């Protein structure tokens, strides 16, 4: 047997898992629930200024990138565990390519914002 | 005489015990992690089209269908947080000298961090307007 | 007063005559202080001498009497009848292993996996007995002590879905043992052991279901050992990439 290169993705998976565990619930509560109802940042111009702040752009990019890699890595194994043993290799490719594609789109989004 | 009998593993193993079902639920929270990352990217694109587009997007999010879907998602990511914090002490096994830091201390420290982060996020958005 | 009894549904398989396993019911006396193993021994003694099963110490130390009791991997020597009475108890051989006969499983695959992680101290600099032992501080001992308490009962293999789905996976007990030696300050076999522990069939096969630790009668917590093994393998991997000149 030989040492695996799994640490490359596992470290990103773990970083993404930790980051999303820490911030995703509050991120969702604020931006998906409270902001649309105007409880916070009810003025669209003020919200826009907030979203365009360099620190928010950086945060949003890191959250989306690590969150997607975390999810891709988990789903890759879960789909195999659910019985798709024969498709393990294509599933891994689709999951990780999806995460990379999403990361590129997220990067584009925070730049054009 | 040796004639070993081989049993095949059931495909529906993950339905067969509460612990396995909980494991599968934990793994499937990743669907919502990915979804909310995707939703955030959508928010950013709507914002890049100006304040009117952004306001329209946010108004759509107040529709009951979206609210129910997102409430399920919020529960899922909270479950992700809960299970991640619970398992962290096993992965880290922090030691001070001969003693291992008790699991509940590590779990508790993470929840404190969670509350602090939540307070900071809330305060920043409050300051924004 | 009629004696209280309980029914044991025991899975049978006699390779010389049965093409498939089947269940046989035995009515055994119910005693509050009897464990499942006592009931099996009573059957063997008074009802059916052909029933085969492994056992030895009767006190949760030897790790021989692991079986599926009502679908859960348990040591039958510390599983009391009173936990199930008056309902019948189903006893099967541990899952995720081939069946040798009745409740006896083939443990060849497990022994092969144990050997792969080289569960012994590897030294480059060997001391002679006159030079004394390899000393260790209590703090160094406690880093791995919990992971060295395994009795090889294989309950964790029966609990692990990854073992069931991917027979090549080294599995909880063997990996916990491998990590135990990685964490041992006396050991100098890091590189050769990491080849096995840090492989796809090693810690990276684990999806952290965590059931191995739930069923472990010795609280070894193999799931924790494996996750810590992932951290060790990851740090090792980055070190190799960032400092390729640092390799011995």
Image (spheres, rainbow, N blue to C red):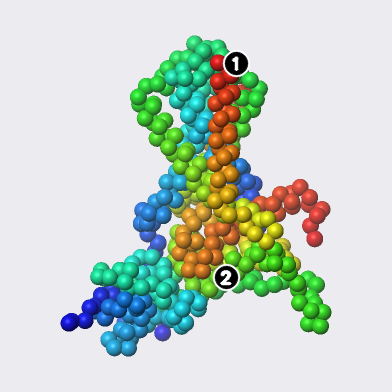
In the rendered image, the quadrant that contains the N terminus of chain C is bottom left
**In the figure, is residue B115 to the left or right of C238?**
left
Chain letter, disc 1 residue: A
* Image coordinates for residue B99, horizontal then vertical, percent: 65, 59
Residue C11 can be seen, yes or no = no
Q: How crowded is mark 1: few (under 14 residues within 10 Å), some or many (20 or more)?
A: some
Residue indicated by mark 1: A49
- Quarter residue C183 falls in: bottom right
Q: Which mark is residue A19?
A: none
Local SS, label 2: loop
Residue indicated by mark 2: C149
User: Residue shown at 50%/78% (left/top)?
Assistant: C62
The one of B121 and B102 positioned closer to us in this rendering: B102
Residue A3 vs B72, above or below: the answer is below
Can marks 1 and 2 be said to lie on one chain?
Answer: no
User: Residue shown at 26%/81% (left/top)?
Assistant: C29
Residue C34 vs B42, above or below: the answer is below
Local SS, label 1: helix
The one of C196 and C224 positioned closer to us in this rendering: C224
Residue C47 can be seen, yes or no = yes
- The number of numbered badges drawn on the structure is 2
In three-dimensional space, the C-alpha distance between marks 1 and 2, rounded to whole angstroms, equals 58 Å
* Image coordinates for residue B61, horizontal then vertical, percent: 42, 22
User: Residue shown at 21%/81% (left/top)?
Assistant: C3
* Image coordinates for residue A23, horizontal then vertical, percent: 55, 34
Residue A93 vs A109, above or below: the answer is below
The one of C134 and C104 positioned closer to us in this rendering: C134
In the rendered image, the quadrant that contains the C terminus of chain C is bottom right
Q: Residues within 10 Å of mark 2 (few under 14, many from 20)?
A: some
Chain letter, disc 2 residue: C
* Image coordinates for residue C178, horizontal then vertical, percent: 62, 65
User: Residue shown at 41%/50% (left/top)?
Assistant: B22
């Amino acid at each position: 047997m030989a040492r695996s290169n799994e640490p490359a993705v596992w470290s990103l998976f773990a970083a993404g898992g930790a980051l999303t565990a820490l911030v995703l619930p509050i991120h969702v509560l604020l931006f998906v629930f409270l902001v649309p109802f105007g409880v916070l940042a009810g003025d669209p111009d003020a919200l826009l200024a907030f979203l365009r702040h360099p620190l928010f752009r950086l945060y949003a990019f890191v959250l989306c990138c690590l969150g997607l890699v975390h999810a891709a890595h988990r789903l890759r194994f879960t789909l195999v565990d659910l019985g798709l043993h024969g498709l393990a290799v294509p599933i891994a490719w689709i999951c990780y390519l999806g995460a990379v594609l999403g990361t590129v789109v997220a990067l584009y989004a925070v730049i054009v914002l | 005489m040796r004639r070993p009998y081989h049993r095949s593993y059931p495909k529906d193993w993950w339905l067969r015990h509460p612990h396995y079902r909980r494991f599968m639920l934990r793994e499937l929270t990743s669907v919502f992690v990915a979804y909310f990352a995707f939703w955030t990217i959508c928010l950013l694109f709507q914002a890049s089209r100006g304040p009117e587009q952004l306001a329209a997007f946010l108004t759509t999010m107040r529709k009951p269908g979206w609210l129910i879907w997102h409430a399920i998602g919020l529960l899922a990511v909270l479950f992700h947080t809960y299970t991640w914090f619970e398992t962290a002490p096993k992965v880290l096994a922090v030691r001070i000298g001969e003693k291992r830091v008790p699991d509940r201390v590590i779990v508790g420290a993470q929840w404190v961090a969670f509350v602090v982060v939540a307070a900071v996020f809330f305060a920043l958005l409050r300051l924004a307007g | 007063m009629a004696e209280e009894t309980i029914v044991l549904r025991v899975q049978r398989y006699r390779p010389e005559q049965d093409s498939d396993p089947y269940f046989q019911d035995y009515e055994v006396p119910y005693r509050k202080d009897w464990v499942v193993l006592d009931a099996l021994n009573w059957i063997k003694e008074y009802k059916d001498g052909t029933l085969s099963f492994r056992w030895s110490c009767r006190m949760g130390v030897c790790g021989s009497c692991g079986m599926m009791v009502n679908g859960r991997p348990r040591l039958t020597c510390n599983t009391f009848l009173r936990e199930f009475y008056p309902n019948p108890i189903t006893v099967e051989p541990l899952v995720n292993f081939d069946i040798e006969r009745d409740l006896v499983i083939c443990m060849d695959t497990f022994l092969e996996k144990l050997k792969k992680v080289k569960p012994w101290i590897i030294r480059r600099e060997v001391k002679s007995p006159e030079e004394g032992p390899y000393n260790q501080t209590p703090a160094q001992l406690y880093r791995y002590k919990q992971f060295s308490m395994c009795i090889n009962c294989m309950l964790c293999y029966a609990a692990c879905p990854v073992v069931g789905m991917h027979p090549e996976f080294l599995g909880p007990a063997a990996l916990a043992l491998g990590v135990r030696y990685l964490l041992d300050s006396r050991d100098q076999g890091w590189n050769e052991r990491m080849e096995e522990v840090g492989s796809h069939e090693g810690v990276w096969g684990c999806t952290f279901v965590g059931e191995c630790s739930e069923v472990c009668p010795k609280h070894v917590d193999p799931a924790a050992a494996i996750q810590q093994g992932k951290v060790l393998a990851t740090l090792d991997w980055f070190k190799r990439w960032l400092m390729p000149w640092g390799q011995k």
